[in-house]
Image (spheres, rainbow, N blue to C red):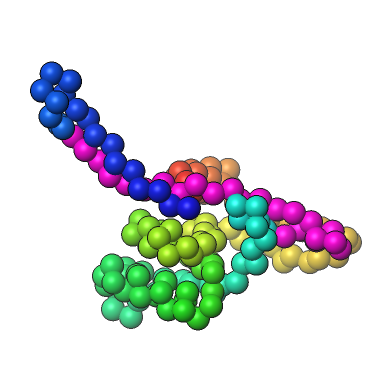
Amino acid sequence: HLYELDVRLVDVASGQVVDRVSSYAGLRRVGRRRDSAGHLQFTLNGKLLFHFGALDQGWWPDGLLTPPSDEALLSDIVFQKAAGFNMIRKHVKVEPRRFYFHCDRLGMLVWQDHVSAGHGPRWSKLKAFPTHPRRDGSWSRVEHRQFMRELDAMVGQLES
């Protein structure tokens, strides 16, 4: 459900277009429902959607985290789509905006992980038993505030 947008600023006196911007918008409804056993399932636009995808760390042989070209970004997405995946879990980093544009255009869902938070926090060992309660990382307040600022900026940048 992608829609092309074309916004024009017209000078009323002359009728001339003085500025113009073109873009697109995706309209969708993401939801959940329970199956007959009570398990939650994802829905997209009211239809059940099983998320089937791969972990994509975005590593490139010649540029480490920088893709060599727009074509390379597109090629990776097309390859995963042709392999039958409908979702990419983007790990460790935020890709250039073109990656998300291509995913939108090709109907590829993206699960975006938050960016790794450096060398900290010093993690405690997590155990899944009631006698060993889980504990998050032991960040200082300054480290935690910095992480939250960066997480907020990432979510604000991607916003869809």
Q: Residue furthest left?
A: 14
Instruction: Describe residue 80's horizontal placement relative to residue 22 as left or right.
Output: right
Q: Position of residue 121 (x, y in %)?
A: 58, 58
Q: Position of residue 4 (x, y in %)?
A: 35, 48
Which residue is drawn at the image coordinates 46% and 71% (left, top)? 57
Q: Main secondary structure of the magenta part?
A: strand
Residue 44 sits above or below residue 156 on the image: below
Count the marks: 0
| Closest to the observer, 11 or 130 | 11
Which residue is drawn at the image coordinates 58% and 43% (left, top)? 141
Q: Is residue 24 rendered magenta in the image?
A: yes
Q: Residue furthest top?
A: 13
Q: Position of residue 107 (x, y in %)?
A: 47, 63
Q: Position of residue 62 (x, y in %)?
A: 28, 78
Q: Is residue 40 rendered magenta in the image?
A: yes
Q: Tell me the magenta residue range.
A: 19-41
Asked if one can make out residue 155 in the rendered structure from this viewpoint, the answer is no
| Closest to the observer, 160 or 93 | 160
Instruction: Describe residue 63's horizontal placement relative to residue 42 as left or right.
Output: left
Residue 150 sits above or below residue 66 on the image: above
Where residue 133 sits, quadrant-wise, is bottom right
| Closest to the observer, 112 or 65 | 112
Q: Residue furthest front?
A: 15
Which residue is drawn at the image coordinates 28% and 36% (left, top)? 7
| Closest to the observer, 130 or 67 | 67
Instruction: Describe residue 141's horizontal placement relative to residue 102 as left or right.
Output: right
Q: Residue furthest right?
A: 131
Which residue is drawn at the image coordinates 61% and 55% (left, top)? 44
Asked if one can make out residue 60 in the rendered structure from this viewpoint, the answer is yes
